[in-house]
Amino acid sequence: MTLRRVLGLATLPTLAIVLYICFILLHPFLSSSNTTVLVTEPPHLTARFSLLIGILTQADNLCSATLPSPNNGVLVALEIMRFNDIIILNCNENMNSRKTYTYFSSLPRILLRRYDYVMKADDDVFLRLALLALSGLQPLQRLDLYYGFVIPCASMNPFVDYMSGMGFLLSWDIVEWISSSNVLANDNFGPEDKLVGKWLNIGKKAKNRFSNKPATYDYPGTNGRCSHDLIPDTVAVHRIKRWDQWLHVLNFFNVTKELVHSNLYSISFNG
Protein backbone atom coordinates (compact mmCIF):
# COMPACT_ATOMS: atom_id res chain seq x y z
CA MET A 1 0.00 0.00 0.00
CA THR A 2 1.62 3.23 -1.12
CA LEU A 3 0.86 6.48 0.67
CA ARG A 4 1.53 9.68 -1.25
CA ARG A 5 0.44 13.32 -1.25
CA VAL A 6 -1.30 15.14 -4.11
CA LEU A 7 -2.43 18.74 -4.51
CA GLY A 8 -5.48 20.54 -5.79
CA LEU A 9 -6.14 24.21 -5.09
CA ALA A 10 -9.24 26.43 -5.09
CA THR A 11 -9.14 30.09 -4.12
CA LEU A 12 -10.56 31.23 -0.79
CA PRO A 13 -10.60 34.93 0.15
CA THR A 14 -11.02 34.28 3.89
CA LEU A 15 -8.77 31.21 4.08
CA ALA A 16 -11.32 29.40 6.23
CA ILE A 17 -11.21 25.72 5.31
CA VAL A 18 -8.21 23.63 4.47
CA LEU A 19 -7.95 19.95 3.61
CA TYR A 20 -5.11 17.57 4.17
CA ILE A 21 -5.25 15.14 1.31
CA CYS A 22 -3.60 11.86 0.49
CA PHE A 23 -4.34 8.81 -1.53
CA ILE A 24 -3.90 5.15 -0.84
CA LEU A 25 -2.83 2.66 -3.46
CA LEU A 26 -3.21 -0.94 -2.38
CA HIS A 27 0.20 -2.57 -2.56
CA PRO A 28 2.33 -4.78 -0.29
CA PHE A 29 4.43 -1.79 0.78
CA LEU A 30 3.65 1.36 2.73
CA SER A 31 5.92 4.16 1.53
CA SER A 32 6.56 7.80 2.36
CA SER A 33 9.13 10.12 0.82
CA ASN A 34 11.76 8.81 3.22
CA THR A 35 10.87 5.30 4.32
CA THR A 36 9.39 2.05 3.05
CA VAL A 37 7.79 -0.35 5.51
CA LEU A 38 6.57 -3.83 4.68
CA VAL A 39 2.89 -4.31 5.51
CA THR A 40 1.57 -7.80 6.18
CA GLU A 41 -0.97 -8.51 3.47
CA PRO A 42 -3.06 -11.63 2.84
CA PRO A 43 -1.93 -13.22 -0.47
CA HIS A 44 -5.35 -12.86 -2.11
CA LEU A 45 -5.33 -9.05 -1.82
CA THR A 46 -3.85 -8.27 -5.22
CA ALA A 47 -6.21 -5.60 -6.56
CA ARG A 48 -5.00 -2.01 -6.63
CA PHE A 49 -7.14 1.04 -6.00
CA SER A 50 -6.70 4.73 -5.33
CA LEU A 51 -8.35 6.69 -2.52
CA LEU A 52 -8.30 10.43 -1.93
CA ILE A 53 -8.90 11.38 1.71
CA GLY A 54 -9.88 14.98 2.45
CA ILE A 55 -9.76 16.00 6.12
CA LEU A 56 -11.74 19.21 6.50
CA THR A 57 -10.33 21.68 8.98
CA GLN A 58 -9.73 25.38 9.56
CA ALA A 59 -6.51 27.22 8.86
CA ASP A 60 -6.09 27.98 12.59
CA ASN A 61 -5.98 24.23 13.29
CA LEU A 62 -3.00 23.75 10.97
CA CYS A 63 -0.72 26.01 12.96
CA SER A 64 -0.28 27.12 16.56
CA ALA A 65 -3.48 28.50 18.04
CA THR A 66 -1.45 31.44 19.35
CA LEU A 67 -0.60 32.65 15.87
CA PRO A 68 -2.74 35.54 14.61
CA SER A 69 -4.97 34.74 11.64
CA PRO A 70 -3.19 37.03 9.12
CA ASN A 71 -0.17 34.73 9.35
CA ASN A 72 -2.17 31.69 8.30
CA GLY A 73 -2.09 32.61 4.62
CA VAL A 74 1.70 32.56 4.57
CA LEU A 75 2.06 29.45 6.74
CA VAL A 76 -0.48 27.43 4.78
CA ALA A 77 1.10 28.54 1.51
CA LEU A 78 4.47 27.33 2.77
CA GLU A 79 2.92 23.97 3.70
CA ILE A 80 1.49 23.66 0.18
CA MET A 81 4.86 24.54 -1.40
CA ARG A 82 6.72 22.04 0.79
CA PHE A 83 4.37 19.04 0.84
CA ASN A 84 1.63 19.58 -1.79
CA ASP A 85 -0.95 18.19 0.62
CA ILE A 86 -3.55 20.95 1.04
CA ILE A 87 -6.58 22.15 -0.89
CA ILE A 88 -8.15 25.49 0.02
CA LEU A 89 -11.92 25.53 -0.43
CA ASN A 90 -13.87 28.57 -1.50
CA CYS A 91 -16.27 28.62 1.46
CA ASN A 92 -16.31 29.39 5.18
CA GLU A 93 -16.15 26.83 7.99
CA ASN A 94 -19.69 25.66 8.73
CA MET A 95 -21.82 22.59 9.34
CA ASN A 96 -24.84 23.35 7.17
CA SER A 97 -23.80 25.65 4.35
CA ARG A 98 -22.17 24.12 1.25
CA LYS A 99 -18.90 22.89 2.79
CA THR A 100 -19.25 19.25 1.78
CA TYR A 101 -20.85 20.17 -1.53
CA THR A 102 -17.96 22.53 -2.29
CA TYR A 103 -15.45 19.80 -1.49
CA PHE A 104 -16.91 17.05 -3.66
CA SER A 105 -18.04 19.29 -6.53
CA SER A 106 -14.62 20.96 -6.80
CA LEU A 107 -12.50 17.83 -7.11
CA PRO A 108 -13.20 16.82 -10.75
CA ARG A 109 -12.36 20.36 -11.84
CA ILE A 110 -9.14 20.89 -9.86
CA LEU A 111 -7.51 17.47 -9.72
CA LEU A 112 -5.28 16.25 -12.53
CA ARG A 113 -6.39 12.64 -12.14
CA ARG A 114 -9.37 10.62 -11.04
CA TYR A 115 -9.50 8.25 -8.06
CA ASP A 116 -11.46 5.08 -7.44
CA TYR A 117 -12.80 6.52 -4.16
CA VAL A 118 -13.00 9.92 -2.46
CA MET A 119 -13.39 10.26 1.31
CA LYS A 120 -14.47 13.18 3.46
CA ALA A 121 -13.39 13.09 7.12
CA ASP A 122 -13.49 15.43 10.12
CA ASP A 123 -10.30 16.65 11.79
CA ASP A 124 -11.21 14.97 15.08
CA VAL A 125 -11.03 11.49 13.50
CA PHE A 126 -8.18 9.00 13.91
CA LEU A 127 -7.94 6.93 10.71
CA ARG A 128 -6.03 3.68 10.42
CA LEU A 129 -5.21 3.69 6.73
CA ALA A 130 -3.99 0.12 6.38
CA LEU A 131 -7.16 -1.21 8.04
CA LEU A 132 -9.31 1.05 5.91
CA ALA A 133 -7.67 -0.19 2.74
CA LEU A 134 -7.04 -3.85 3.44
CA SER A 135 -10.09 -4.85 5.44
CA GLY A 136 -12.72 -2.53 4.04
CA LEU A 137 -12.31 -1.19 0.54
CA GLN A 138 -10.44 -3.77 -1.48
CA PRO A 139 -13.37 -6.15 -2.06
CA LEU A 140 -16.00 -3.44 -2.61
CA GLN A 141 -17.51 -2.12 -5.82
CA ARG A 142 -15.59 0.66 -7.59
CA LEU A 143 -18.80 2.21 -8.96
CA ASP A 144 -21.90 3.65 -7.33
CA LEU A 145 -20.50 3.13 -3.81
CA TYR A 146 -21.42 4.89 -0.55
CA TYR A 147 -19.35 3.77 2.47
CA GLY A 148 -19.31 4.92 6.09
CA PHE A 149 -21.02 4.79 9.50
CA VAL A 150 -24.76 4.61 8.94
CA ILE A 151 -27.12 6.76 10.99
CA PRO A 152 -29.03 6.04 13.22
CA CYS A 153 -26.32 4.68 15.47
CA ALA A 154 -28.12 1.48 16.37
CA SER A 155 -28.75 0.51 12.73
CA MET A 156 -26.61 -1.94 10.76
CA ASN A 157 -28.57 -1.34 7.53
CA PRO A 158 -26.59 0.96 5.18
CA PHE A 159 -29.75 1.73 3.19
CA VAL A 160 -31.82 2.96 6.12
CA ASP A 161 -30.75 6.64 6.08
CA TYR A 162 -27.33 8.29 5.57
CA MET A 163 -23.65 7.99 6.55
CA SER A 164 -22.27 10.08 9.41
CA GLY A 165 -20.14 13.08 8.49
CA MET A 166 -17.32 11.74 10.70
CA GLY A 167 -15.91 10.04 7.62
CA PHE A 168 -17.70 8.68 4.58
CA LEU A 169 -16.59 7.66 1.12
CA LEU A 170 -18.01 7.90 -2.39
CA SER A 171 -16.89 6.27 -5.61
CA TRP A 172 -15.54 8.65 -8.25
CA ASP A 173 -18.58 8.33 -10.54
CA ILE A 174 -20.77 9.73 -7.76
CA VAL A 175 -18.31 12.58 -7.15
CA GLU A 176 -18.50 13.46 -10.85
CA TRP A 177 -22.29 13.37 -10.68
CA ILE A 178 -22.31 15.75 -7.70
CA SER A 179 -20.03 18.12 -9.59
CA SER A 180 -22.17 18.16 -12.74
CA SER A 181 -25.69 18.10 -11.26
CA ASN A 182 -27.67 21.33 -11.60
CA VAL A 183 -30.18 19.99 -9.09
CA LEU A 184 -27.58 19.61 -6.34
CA ALA A 185 -26.08 23.01 -7.13
CA ASN A 186 -29.37 24.48 -5.89
CA ASP A 187 -29.90 22.07 -2.98
CA ASN A 188 -26.84 22.22 -0.75
CA PHE A 189 -27.87 24.00 2.45
CA GLY A 190 -28.57 21.89 5.53
CA PRO A 191 -26.85 19.21 7.66
CA GLU A 192 -24.05 18.12 5.37
CA ASP A 193 -24.02 14.37 5.96
CA LYS A 194 -27.81 14.13 5.85
CA LEU A 195 -27.84 16.13 2.61
CA VAL A 196 -25.49 13.67 0.91
CA GLY A 197 -27.88 10.83 1.73
CA LYS A 198 -30.75 12.91 0.36
CA TRP A 199 -28.89 13.65 -2.88
CA LEU A 200 -28.12 9.99 -3.47
CA ASN A 201 -31.75 9.03 -2.94
CA ILE A 202 -32.98 11.79 -5.27
CA GLY A 203 -30.56 10.70 -7.98
CA LYS A 204 -31.17 7.00 -7.37
CA LYS A 205 -27.45 6.64 -6.77
CA ALA A 206 -25.31 4.48 -4.45
CA LYS A 207 -26.88 1.12 -5.11
CA ASN A 208 -23.78 -0.29 -3.41
CA ARG A 209 -23.68 0.77 0.25
CA PHE A 210 -21.51 -0.45 3.11
CA SER A 211 -21.61 0.49 6.81
CA ASN A 212 -18.32 -0.28 8.51
CA LYS A 213 -19.62 -1.00 12.02
CA PRO A 214 -18.33 -1.68 14.62
CA ALA A 215 -14.90 -0.79 13.16
CA THR A 216 -15.88 2.90 12.90
CA TYR A 217 -17.30 4.68 15.95
CA ASP A 218 -17.22 7.70 18.25
CA TYR A 219 -14.68 7.90 21.07
CA PRO A 220 -15.84 5.96 24.17
CA GLY A 221 -18.46 7.78 26.20
CA THR A 222 -18.88 10.77 23.87
CA ASN A 223 -22.02 10.01 21.90
CA GLY A 224 -24.36 7.40 23.34
CA ARG A 225 -24.98 4.43 21.05
CA CYS A 226 -22.52 5.77 18.44
CA SER A 227 -19.69 5.18 20.97
CA HIS A 228 -18.07 2.03 22.27
CA ASP A 229 -14.74 0.93 23.73
CA LEU A 230 -11.64 0.98 21.53
CA ILE A 231 -11.25 -2.33 19.67
CA PRO A 232 -8.25 -3.86 17.85
CA ASP A 233 -9.92 -3.96 14.41
CA THR A 234 -10.74 -0.24 14.44
CA VAL A 235 -10.77 1.65 11.15
CA ALA A 236 -11.71 5.09 12.54
CA VAL A 237 -12.39 6.77 15.88
CA HIS A 238 -14.36 10.04 15.89
CA ARG A 239 -14.89 12.86 18.41
CA ILE A 240 -11.34 12.93 19.73
CA LYS A 241 -11.43 16.48 21.06
CA ARG A 242 -8.78 16.59 23.80
CA TRP A 243 -5.08 15.80 23.98
CA ASP A 244 -5.62 13.13 26.65
CA GLN A 245 -8.10 11.40 24.32
CA TRP A 246 -5.58 11.49 21.47
CA LEU A 247 -2.92 10.00 23.75
CA HIS A 248 -5.30 7.25 24.81
CA VAL A 249 -6.00 6.34 21.19
CA LEU A 250 -2.34 6.52 20.12
CA ASN A 251 -1.31 4.34 23.04
CA PHE A 252 -4.03 1.77 22.42
CA PHE A 253 -3.00 1.26 18.79
CA ASN A 254 0.76 1.39 19.55
CA VAL A 255 1.25 4.31 17.17
CA THR A 256 4.24 5.53 19.18
CA LYS A 257 6.11 2.23 19.27
CA GLU A 258 8.19 3.12 16.20
CA LEU A 259 9.52 6.35 17.74
CA VAL A 260 13.30 6.29 17.87
CA HIS A 261 14.79 7.32 21.20
CA SER A 262 16.67 10.60 21.13
CA ASN A 263 18.42 12.70 23.76
CA LEU A 264 16.90 15.74 22.09
CA TYR A 265 13.48 15.05 23.58
CA SER A 266 11.91 13.28 26.51
CA ILE A 267 8.31 12.20 26.01
CA SER A 268 6.19 9.78 28.00
CA PHE A 269 3.17 8.27 26.28
CA ASN A 270 2.02 6.31 29.29
CA GLY A 271 -0.86 7.80 31.17
Image (cartoon, rainbow, N blue to C red):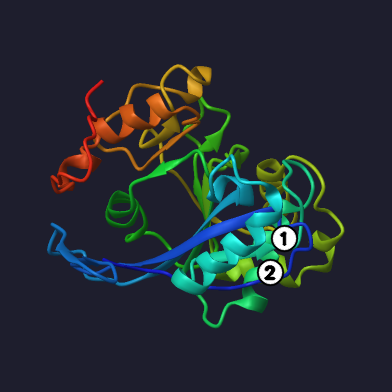
Q: Position of residue 8 (x, y in %)?
A: 58, 73
Question: Which residue does the image show at 54% across and 50% down from the upper left?
Answer: 62
Residue 58 visible, this angle: no
Query: What type is the residue that disc 2 sits on?
Result: Ser
Give the labeled residue for mark 1: 102
Q: Is residue 197 above or below residue 250?
A: below
Instruction: Kindly state the secondary structure of the residue where label 1 is placed.
Output: helix
Q: Quadrant of residue 76?
A: bottom right
Question: Which image quarter holds the C terminus?
Answer: top left
Look at label 1 and name its amino acid.
Thr
Counting the numbered discs, the total is: 2
Residue position for label 2? 106
Asked if marks 2 and 1 touch (Cβ < 8 Å), the reply is: yes
Q: What element does badge 2 sit on?
A: helix
Residue 169 coordinates in the image, percent (x, y): 51, 54
Residue 150 position in % (x across, y down): 53, 37
